[in-house]
Amino acid sequence: MVRKAGVADVAVLAELRGIDGDELEAFADWVAAHAETHVPFVAEIDGRVVGAAWLLIAERVPGNSSMDRWYGDVQSVMVFPECRNRGVGSALMGAILAEARTRGLLHVTVHSGRRAVEFYLRNGFSHHRQLLLWEPEAR
């Protein structure tokens, strides 16, 4: 089962992100402060949260005869190692993309590590020739 995460899920969301106890309060404050822009989803098996994924919702500058130009970005898809390869990640992606459709988002992007590219391709994403990346020089 996949559902939107709530306040009661903050500890497991933090655990999935590798955030330990002394940073939990700051993480909970961040989640609350970003509730409108960062929507977390959790996957459960037998009532236990085993994975999570986030949908960043952002607005582009108006243009192209449209004042309403919202898009999404998938972030922090995490599944506990012992629950991987059981469809958990795909279920999370299904929920995120359903939310994107419900909200009428223009598109959804994802910045993937090499190991996960095939996963995203299987879940409906494609390579896009216009997405470019700038990174600052190493210091």
Image (tube, rainbow, N blue to C red):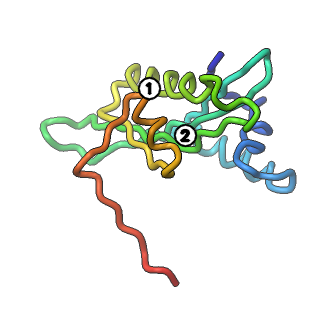
Mark identifier at residue 97: 1
Q: In this view, does 113 lie to the left or right of 52?
A: left
Q: Quadrant of the N terminus?
A: top right
Q: In this view, does 28 lie to the left or right of 68?
A: right
**Residue beneath the point at 27% across and 34% down:** 68
Residue placed most toward the observer, 92 or 120: 120
> Which amino acid type corresponds to the residue marked 1 in the rendered image?
Leu
Mark identifier at residue 38: 2
Indicate the position of residue 62 as horizontal and vertical percent values.
Answer: 23, 44
**Residue beneath the point at 42% across and 75% down:** 136
Residue at the extreme bottom: 139
Badge 2 crowding class, 10 Å Cα cut-off, few under 14, some 14 to 19, many 20 or more, is: many
**Residue beneath the point at 13% across and 36% down:** 65
The answer to whether residue 62 is above or below residue 121 is below
Report the number of numbered marks: 2
> Which amino acid type corresponds to the residue marked 2 in the rendered image?
His
- Mark 1 lies on a secondary structure that is helix
Mark identifier at residue 26: none
Badge 1 crowding class, 10 Å Cα cut-off, few under 14, some 14 to 19, many 20 or more, is: many
Which callout, 1 or 2, points to the residue nearer the camera? 1
Between marks 1 and 2, how big is the CA–CA gap?
A: 14 Å
Indicate the position of residue 95 as horizontal and vertical percent values.
Answer: 52, 22
